[in-house]
Image (cartoon, grey):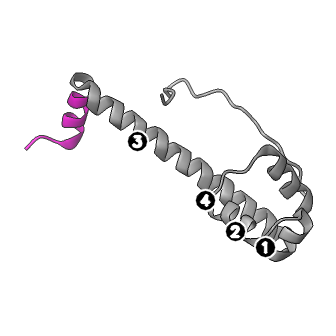
């Protein structure tokens, strides 16, 4: 029996359809982790501020359900929403674009 890694490397090299599907799945997974990371940061900021979702929703002139969706990562937030969230929780919004490490390849 061949090791999985060997088979995977062979298929990545020789099977364009496999490679496309693998890269698409990898990109999708990376997006999910990004959304999960953002959701966790939002929730942590709210808790540090001592606010409930309902309190925060009131401060942002929105509904508690919208805050819940953001904090679960079910809804991507606009920059304006993130700014309002930051202001309501006593934080500042900072968006940083960092160069990729040399050994990283961009997901396509």
Residue designated by label 2: 68
Which residue of the protein is positioned furthest toward the left in this rendering? Answer: 1
Toward which corner of the image does residue 46 lie, by quadrant? Answer: bottom right
- Badge 1 marks a residue whose secondary structure is helix
Q: Residue at x 47, y 46 (%)?
A: 29
The tag on residue 74 is 4
**Residue in view at x 20 percent, y 35 percent:** 6
101 lies above or below 74:
above
**In front of the other: 50 or 19:** 19
How far apart are the two marked residues, 3 and 2, measured between alpha carbons? 26 Å
Q: Quadrant of residue 41?
A: bottom right
Q: Do callouts 3 and 4 mark residues in contact (Cβ within 8 Å)? A: no
Q: Secondary structure at mark 3?
A: helix
Looking at the image, tell me whether mark 3 or mark 4 is earlier in sequence order: 3
The answer to whether residue 82 of the structure is visible from this angle is: yes
* N-terminal label among 2 and 4: 2
Vertical comparison of 31 with 48: above or below: above
* Cα–Cα span, label 2 and label 4: 9 Å
* Relative image position of residue 39 (x, y in whole percent): 67, 58
How many C-alpha atoms fall within 10 Å of the one at disc 4: few (<14), some, or many (≥20)?
A: some
Return the disc, 3 or 1, that comes first in the chain's sequence. 3
Looking at the image, is mark 4 or mark 1 earlier in the sequence? 1
Mark 2 touches mark 4? (CB < 8 Å) = no
Residue 68 sits in which quadrant?
Answer: bottom right
**Residue bounds of the magenta highlight:** 1-12
Q: Nearer the viewer, mark 3 or mark 4?
A: 4
Label ID, residue 25: 3
Q: Verify CB contact (< 8 Å) between mark 2 and mark 1.
A: yes
> Residue 53's mark?
1
């Amino acid at each position: 029996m061949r090791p999985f890694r060997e088979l995977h490397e062979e298929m990545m090299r020789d099977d364009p359809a496999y490679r496309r599907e693998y890269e698409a799945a990898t990109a999708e997974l990376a997006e999910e982790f990004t959304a999960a990371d953002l959701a966790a940061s939002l929730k942590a900021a709210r808790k540090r501020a001592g606010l409930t979702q309902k309190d925060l929703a009131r401060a942002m002139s929105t509904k508690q359900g919208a805050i819940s969706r953001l904090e679960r990562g079910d809804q991507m937030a606009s920059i304006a929403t993130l700014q309002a969230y930051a202001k309501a929780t006593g934080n500042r919004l900072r968006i940083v674009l960092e160069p990729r490490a040399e050994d990283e390849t961009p997901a396509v």
